[in-house]
Image (cartoon, grey):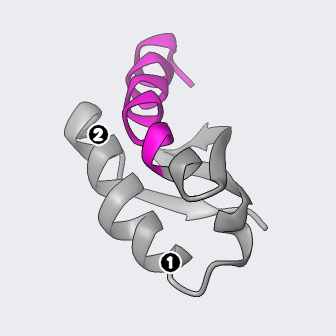
Amino acid sequence: MSTEIQNKVEEALEEIRPFLISDGGNIKLISIEDNVVKVQLEGACSGCSVNQMTLKNGVEATIKRHAPEIEEVVNIA
């Protein structure tokens, strides 16, 4: 994983993290492999019924805006 890509992903997560925290959750970067970002939703986000929508529409969209080379974001439960 390149440092440049990791920095872009971390920057994207810092942008979205306040919204997750305000809902009682958080997100942690697990790894970046073959342009796939693996994250772990924490707190209220881990059991939320709309976490897949948040992951795709919020987290993945934000990460792709910062790092267009990323193809997918997946949650590791």
Q: Which mark is residue 52?
A: 1
Q: Which residues are magenta?
A: 1-19
Residue 63: % across, % down: 34, 42
For label 2, the residue is 69
Residue 58 on image: x %, y %: 34, 59
Nearer to us in this view, 17 or 70: 17
Where is the N terminus found, in terms of image quarters?
A: top right
Splitting the image into 4 quarters, where does residue 23 fall?
bottom right
Q: Amino acid at mark 1?
A: Gln
Query: What is the three-letter code of the residue carrying label 2?
Result: Glu
**How far separated are the C-alphas under marks 1 and 2?**
21 Å
* Residue 10 on the magenta segment: yes
Residue at x 65% of width, y 54% of height: 25
Using the image, determine if residue 60 lies above or below residue 35. Answer: below
Quadrant in the picture for residue 74:
bottom right
Magenta stretch: helix, strand or loop mostly: helix
Image location (x, y in percent) of residue 35: 45, 44
Mark 2 falls on what kind of element?
loop
The foreground one among 69 and 23 is 23
Q: Nearer the viewer, residue 8 or 52?
A: 52
Is residue 37 at least partly visible in the picture?
no
Local crowd size for mark 2, using a 10 Å CA cut-off: few (<14), some (14–19), many (≥20) = few
**In the image, is 41 to the left or to the right of 12?**
right
Q: Is residue 25 above or below residue 35?
A: below
- Residue found 46% across the figure and 65% down from its top: 55
Q: Residue at x 40, y 23 (%)?
A: 11
Taking the spot 29% from the left edge, 39% from the top edge, the residue there is 69
In this picture, is 46 found above or below 49? Answer: above
